[in-house]
């Protein structure tokens, strides 16, 4: 089995969204020191059940909340989801120092990410 390990919140105004989630839920949001504008979202104590996520500028109209599934191999996962009826909407790409990421659209139209951890990804 592969677990959901991350969620992403798209925003039209990232500053407004950061302020909202900090105020409404007490979440800890801080800007990522990476190659894109991205805020890391901490939703609670690491010892408690739940997942953390991220927040970024909305990439296309109607983009909604998505989640990311941890996989051993993004390449194998791409083959698996395509065989099951999904469409790849963002091909495998590197998140430098983090891993490999790809997004698919399931047969119901939901966009989901797949992440292969690899600190050597470039």
Image (cartoon, grey):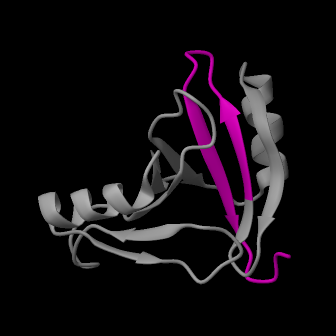
Q: For residue 61, what is the image quadrant?
A: top right
Left or right of 71 on screen, residue 41: left
Residue shown at 54%/78% (left/top)? 32
Q: For residue 116, what is the image quadrant?
A: bottom right
Towards the viewer: 2 or 38 = 38
Say whether residue 85 is magenta: no
Residue shown at 27%/67% (left/top)? 43
Left or right of 55 on screen, residue 57: right
Point out residue 42 in the picture as x, y percentages from the top left corner.
33, 72
What number of labels is visible? Answer: 0
Point out residue 6 in the picture as x, y percentages from the top left corner.
47, 58
Towards the viewer: 103 or 83 = 103
Q: Quadrant of the C terminus?
A: bottom right
Towards the viewer: 50 or 122 = 122
Residue shown at 56%/51% (left/top)? 69
Point out residue 103 in the picture as x, y percentages from the top left corner.
69, 42
Q: Is residue 49 visible?
A: no
Left or right of 1 on screen, residue 7: left
Say whether residue 117 is magenta: yes
Left or right of 87 on screen, residue 60: left
Magenta residue span: 101-122
- Please determine whether, in this image, residue 30 is positioned above or below residue 59: below
Residue shown at 33%/57% (left/top)? 16
Q: Is residue 56 visible?
A: yes
Point out residue 93 in the picture as x, y percentages from the top left corner.
82, 58
């Amino acid at each position: 089995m592969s677990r959901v390990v991350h969620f992403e919140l798209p925003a039209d105004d990232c500053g407004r969204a950061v302020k909202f989630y900090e105020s409404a839920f007490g979440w800890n949001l801080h800007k990522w020191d990476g190659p894109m504008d991205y805020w890391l979202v901490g939703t609670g104590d690491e010892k408690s059940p739940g997942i953390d996520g991220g927040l970024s500028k909305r990439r296309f109209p109607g983009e909604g909340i998505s989640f990311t599934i941890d996989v051993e191999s993004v390449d194998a996962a791409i083959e698996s989801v395509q065989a099951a009826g999904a469409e790849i909407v963002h091909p495998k790409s590197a998140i430098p120092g983090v891993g490999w990421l790809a997004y698919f659209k399931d047969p119901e139209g939901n966009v989901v990410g797949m992440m292969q951890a690899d600190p050597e990804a470039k």
